[in-house]
């Protein structure tokens, strides 16, 4: 089966609409959303409702959690003072936009979704989280030490883990030598639909293919395709500039950082 | 920011409190503040021996990770098991409850290569 996974829309409605148009062409068998629907742009309610009306299983991102709780803290772990100042404006503005019913939806989103396949007399566990299994706002960047990633996956009993949060897509295959064979785990970052940070301003989502012979001992057990799609970046950037949000967020959308 | 005067420090932001031949080791308040919220501390097994400047573990924070370097040579005699349940002790009490390992020093002379509180404070301020 083919599973579409997307995350980090961040209130960017033009990007989400283009993402759904692309998915309609791709015709996945299942769709999951890995969170961070809101923040940094002007359409948090619209984004929530586009996802809700499709009944897409969705987990909470750190920004969703912050807005769900009407907090002034998004868990973004900003490093610099300018980043912190911009972040304060974004969460305050988002809190002012989100309506009660949409806030309630964010507050009740689950933290994780586990999908267990039983294909070849063994289990293949797919775990969906926003940041990491142990922390909603942990950044698992591509250069994370293999030992650390494996420990995180082993503790969560995950053979395939999909997550977002960093806005930088990647797929890493993590082998573990066992007595009779090698156990292959997959760590997949889904990138970002509405706020990419990998210097490619196009939106991004993942198409994960599970085959009938997929197994933990088969290195090519799953196929991972990163689908990049065009969207009206200018519309999203102009919306930022015409709002109380800092203009730098518009520049980030135009350049993908 | 604290710099306890009875501790010794390395340039890699490790403190060591020496009592006889035993040293208790952790990271400084400055180090934890730079790392941000700590999620996990990877520590060695008891009995392991390390030379000065060798990596003895790592700290995994929300946004970054960092290796831990031995300030002096020695054998690990105890690790702080409380960090398994709550790694944020390193954030909230880096010089006390957030300690990481205890060692038996293998060469006391190496203590002379470390910084005192005043010298370390100058490096980070």
Image (cartoon, grey):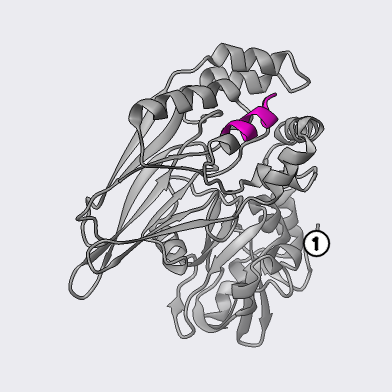
Between residue A30 and residue A187, name the one nearer to us.
A30
Q: Position of residue B45 (x, y in %)?
A: 47, 80
Looking at the image, residue A221 lies above or below residue A153: above
Residue at horizontal 36 percent and vertical 41 percent from the top: A29
Between residue A44 and residue B45, name the one nearer to us.
A44
Most common secondary structure along the magenta stretch = helix
Can residue A221 be seen here? The reply is: yes
**In the displayed structure image, the side of residue B102 where residue A198 appears, left or right:** left
Looking at the image, residue A180 lies above or below residue A81: below
Residue at horizontal 54 percent and vertical 72 percent from the top: B72
Mark 1 residue crowding within 10 angstroms, few (<14) / some (14–19) / many (20+): few
Residue at horizontal 27 percent and vertical 68 percent from the top: A122
Can residue B106 be seen here? The reply is: no
Q: Position of residue A247 (x, y in %)?
A: 70, 18
Indicate the quadrant where residue A124 lies.
bottom left
Task: Please give the range of residues in magenta.
Answer: A40-50
Q: Position of residue A191 (x, y in %)?
A: 47, 36
Q: Quadrant of the C terminus of chain A?
A: top right
Looking at the image, residue A20 lies above or below residue A161: above
Q: Is residue B3 magenta?
A: no
**In the displayed structure image, the side of residue A87 where residue A58 appears, left or right:** left
Q: Is residue A41 magenta?
A: yes
Looking at the image, residue B10 lies above or below residue A12: below
């Amino acid at each position: 089966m083919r599973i579409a996974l997307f995350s980090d829309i961040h209130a960017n409605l033009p990007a989400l609409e283009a993402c759904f148009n692309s998915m309609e062409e791709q015709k996945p068998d299942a769709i999951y959303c890995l969170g961070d629907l809101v923040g940094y742009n002007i359409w948090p309610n619209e984004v929530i409702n586009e996802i809700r009306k499709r009944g897409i299983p969705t987990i909470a991102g750190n920004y969703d959690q912050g807005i769900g709780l009407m907090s002034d803290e998004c868990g973004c772990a900003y490093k610099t003072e300018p980043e912190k100042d911009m972040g304060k404006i974004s969460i305050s503005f988002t809190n002012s936009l989100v309506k009660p019913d949409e806030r309630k939806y964010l507050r009740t989103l689950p933290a994780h979704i586990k999908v267990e396949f039983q294909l070849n007399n063994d289990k293949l566990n797919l775990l969906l989280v926003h940041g990491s299994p142990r922390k909603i706002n942990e950044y698992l960047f591509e250069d994370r030490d293999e030992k650390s990633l494996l420990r995180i996956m082993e503790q969560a009993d995950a053979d395939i883990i999909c997550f977002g949060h960093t806005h930088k897509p990647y797929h890493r295959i993590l082998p573990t030598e066992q007595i009779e064979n090698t156990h292959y785990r997959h760590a997949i970052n889904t990138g970002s639909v509405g706020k990419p940070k990998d210097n490619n301003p196009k939106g991004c989502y993942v198409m994960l293919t599970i085959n009938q012979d997929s197994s933990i001992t088969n290195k090519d057990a799953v196929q991972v395709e990163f689908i990049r799609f065009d969207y009206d970046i200018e519309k999203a950037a102009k919306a930022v500039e015409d709002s109380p949000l800092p203009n730098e967020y518009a520049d980030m959308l135009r350049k993908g950082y | 920011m604290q710099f306890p005067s009875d501790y010794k420090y390395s340039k890699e932001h490790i403190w060591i409190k020496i009592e006889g031949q035993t040293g208790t080791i952790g990271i400084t308040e400055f180090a934890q503040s730079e790392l941000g919220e700590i999620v996990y501390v990877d520590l060695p097994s008891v009995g392991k021996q390390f030379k000065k400047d060798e990596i003895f573990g790592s700290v995994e924070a929300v946004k970054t990770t960092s290796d831990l370097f031995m300030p002096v040579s020695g054998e690990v005699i105890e690790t702080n098991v409380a960090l398994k349940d709550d790694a944020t002790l390193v954030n909230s009490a880096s010089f006390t409850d957030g300690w990481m390992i205890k060692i038996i020093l293998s060469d006391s002379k190496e203590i002379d290569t470390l910084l005192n509180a005043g010298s370390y404070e100058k490096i980070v301020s």
